[in-house]
Image (spheres, helix red, strand yellow):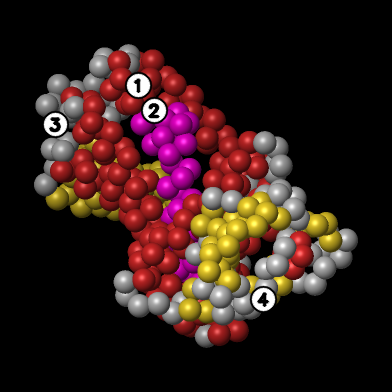
């Protein structure tokens, strides 16, 4: 693994983490909460500087980061401490981190769509499959599959990947008219999977500054959808823990894809593939952090929502123990995934 690949991947991680923590930081400041430290990385502090009440620091390990607020982990009588603010103020601060990741995914998606355009879901129909038999013709534009709106051909591929073999209601446009049909996929021995009989014509559409806002939204949704569906497959046992990748595996994959893109299309293609990775990882981090797991933002939000409903704070000691257990489990999972990533490098 070259140094350049490692540096590029670390920079991408750093940008995504900074933006996530910036969400917590800005909402904390907006709600008058004292921020003691804003850090990039984990572990011992390499260097930092004090500005006002906040220490801005760089840590030894280049993964992760933190926005450490007064009273977040210990009791504090300071009226500006995190626990002493209203429950809705605390909810906004906790939610801001994942929300900023979604904003970042959208902004990068907008830049990418403006640069590359959108592969519209206009199709070729394959002979002998349900799409042809239903009357759908080559050149028709797919609008929806069941209730899933298709902004690009990638949306169709993503949906089909996670809904193999399912009967679906297809909404499509034929000669300017919107039509609907129901298709039951047919198993292809050659492909080894179920097919409706669609293939892409490869038509790329470049929108304007306004229409690209819509395309960017659905581009970001595409990566959120991939993350959510992958989690569903993990929970249902369709994929195993061994299939997970951590920082080491991601560094390797990001570096490889960047080098391949540069070799085939130059620096501009390298930049585009890095934008794709930023969108994917930022959307991934946003979704993962909203899971109701102790120690994650989603776990903290769950406690705050319960507090808002009960109108009474949960015992901080009990909540702290639950979050501590969550941290231990997450760290154990991270160690396992990292070991698995390193093992894969030598297989």
Tell me the distance, in whole angstroms, between the alpha carbons under discs 4 and 2.
Answer: 49 Å
**Mark 1 and mark 4: span between their CA atoms?**
53 Å
Q: Label 2, on which residue?
A: 302
Q: Which residue is mark 3?
A: 80
For label 3, the SS is loop
Nearest to the eye among marks 3 and 2: give it: 2
Work out whether 209 lies above or below 298.
below
The location of residue 57, given as percent across then percent down, is 28, 50
Q: Which residues are magenta?
A: 273-302
Residue 280, magenta (yes or no)? yes
- Report the number of numbered marks: 4
- What separation in Å lies between label 1 and label 3 (alpha carbons)? 22 Å
Q: Is residue 20 left or right of residue 276?
A: left
Q: Residue 344: in sight, yes or no? A: no
76 w.r.t. 65: above or below: above
Q: Callout 3: few (<14), some (14-19), or many (20+) C-alpha neighbours within 10 Å?
A: some
């Amino acid at each position: 693994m070259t140094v350049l690949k490692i540096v590029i991947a670390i920079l991408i991680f750093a940008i995504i983490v900074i933006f996530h923590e910036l969400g917590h930081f800005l909402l904390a400041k907006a709600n008058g909460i004292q921020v003691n430290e804003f850090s990039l990385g984990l572990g011992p502090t390499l260097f930092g500087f004090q500005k006002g009440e906040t220490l801005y620091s760089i840590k030894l390990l280049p993964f992760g980061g933190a926005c450490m607020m007064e009273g977040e982990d210990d009791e504090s009588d300071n009226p500006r401490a995190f626990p002493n603010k209203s429950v809705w103020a605390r909810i906004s601060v906790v939610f801001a981190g994942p929300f900023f990741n979604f904003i970042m995914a959208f902004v990068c998606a907008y830049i990418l769509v403006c640069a590359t355009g959108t592969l519209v879901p206009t199709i070729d129909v394959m002979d002998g499959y349900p799409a042809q038999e239903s009357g759908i013709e080559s050149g028709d534009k797919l609008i929806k599959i069941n209730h899933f709106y298709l902004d690009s051909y990638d949306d169709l591929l993503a949906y089909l990947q996670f809904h193999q073999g399912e009967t679906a209601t297809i909404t499509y446009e034929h000669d300017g008219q919107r039509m609907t049909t129901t298709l039951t996929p047919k198993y292809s021995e050659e492909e080894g999977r179920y097919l409706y009989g669609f293939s892409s014509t490869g038509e790329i559409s470049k929108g304007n500054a306004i229409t690209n806002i819509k395309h960017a939204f659905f581009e970001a949704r595409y990566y959120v959808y991939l993350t959510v569906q992958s989690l569903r497959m993990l929970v249902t046992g369709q994929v195993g823990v061994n299939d997970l990748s951590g920082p080491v595996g991601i560094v390797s994959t990001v570096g490889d894809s960047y080098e391949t893109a540069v070799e085939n299309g130059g620096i501009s293609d390298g930049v585009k593939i890095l934008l794709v990775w930023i969108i994917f990882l930022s959307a991934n981090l946003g979704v993962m952090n909203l899971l109701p797991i102790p120690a994650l933002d989603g776990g903290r939000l769950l406690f705050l929502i319960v507090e808002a409903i009960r109108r009474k704070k949960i015992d901080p000691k009990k909540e702290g123990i639950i979050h501590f257990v969550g941290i231990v489990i997450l760290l154990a999972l991270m160690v396992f995934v990292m070991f698995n990533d390193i093992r894969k490098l030598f297989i």
